[in-house]
Amino acid sequence: MHDMNTTINEETEPDVSSTRAAATTGWLKLARAAAITMVVWSLMLQLMAGQMIPPVLFVGAVFLGFSPFLVGERRRLGLVLAVTALVLMAGNAPFLIDDLSNPESSPTFILGLLSFLAGLTAISSGIAGWRALDPGAVGRVAVGAGSLFVVGAVLSLIAANASDSQPPARGDVELVASGVQWSDDAIEVDASGGIWVDNRDGIRHTFTVESEGFEFEIPAFKSRRSDIELEPGTYGFVCAVPGHESMTGTLLVSG
């Protein structure tokens, strides 16, 4: 009897071990795909912005560093990736919230959605790989994330198409946003006039006078105008979108 039990244990333990290894390997493959997606997101956002964005570069570099190691059955590495992805997503939260709150600016919304879903996938698959959970769910998680991305992207494109540009009114001062920069850092507007902003970036901008609570939004690749609602004087204006702190200028309202 003792010999029989020993034989059964010897036959069972390798089976359990191989099953756990297969589960970990399957989940870490999905985690690697999510990490590579984050690298692609980083590169695409740099190209769209037309400039280097250090926080985005850092996120892309971290996931690029993880990608080659997410093979085989390194269970603990799955946990490390999950924790790292969670920390990076928390740090990127202000940018993600802004991007996902403005679906009419489809380029940044779509990239933000890609980043959000890839980050969630990295976290969930990293934890699942660490715990060696049922590998049968790997495909369902991947398909679910892909489906959510496609649906969100389509809805964003519909919202962008429904958002029309506004032409300038007579007497408007014209300002261009391009390459995350204003075309002029000092403009003069009559108190009875208005401002027309042409956004040539694939990124949402705002024209904001923070001291007076005056603001209007310009979606990606759209133009918007607003009457001046300020008393004569000199004001500072900015783009209030997170990460666009370099977009500053001086507004002179003449009476």
Image (cartoon, rainbow, N blue to C red):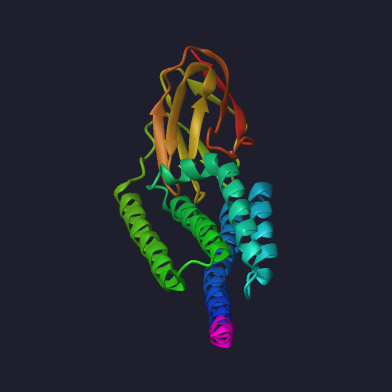
Visible residue check, residue 179: no
Q: Is 169 situated left or right of 182 in this image?
A: left
Question: Which x, y percent locates residue 110?
Answer: 44, 55
* Picture residue at 64% right of the left edge, 68% below the top: 67
Up the image or down, 147 lies above or below 216; here it is below
Residue 178 belongs to the span the image colors magenta: no
Quadrant assignment, res 90: top right
* Picture residue at 57% right of the left edge, 19% below the top: 235
Up the image or down, 132 lies above or below 115; here it is below
Question: Which x, y percent locates residue 132?
Answer: 53, 67
* Picture residue at 64% right of the left edge, 36% below the top: 246
* Picture residue at 53% right of the left edge, 32% below the top: 240
Count every numbered label the image shows and give the total. Answer: 0
Question: Which x, y percent locates residue 242?
Answer: 56, 37
* Closer to us: 238 or 89: 89
Up the image or down, 94 lies above or below 119; here it is above
Visible residue check, residue 167: yes
* Closer to us: 197 or 117: 117
* Closer to us: 121 or 23: 23
Up the image or down, 164 lies above or below 224; here it is below
Residue 2 belongs to the span the image colors magenta: yes
The chief SS type of the magenta part is helix
Q: Is 94 situated left or right of 146 in this image?
A: right
* Closer to us: 160 or 133: 133
**Which residues fall within the magenta stretch?**
1-11
Question: Which x, y percent locates residue 202?
Answer: 49, 51
Q: Residue furthest front?
A: 1
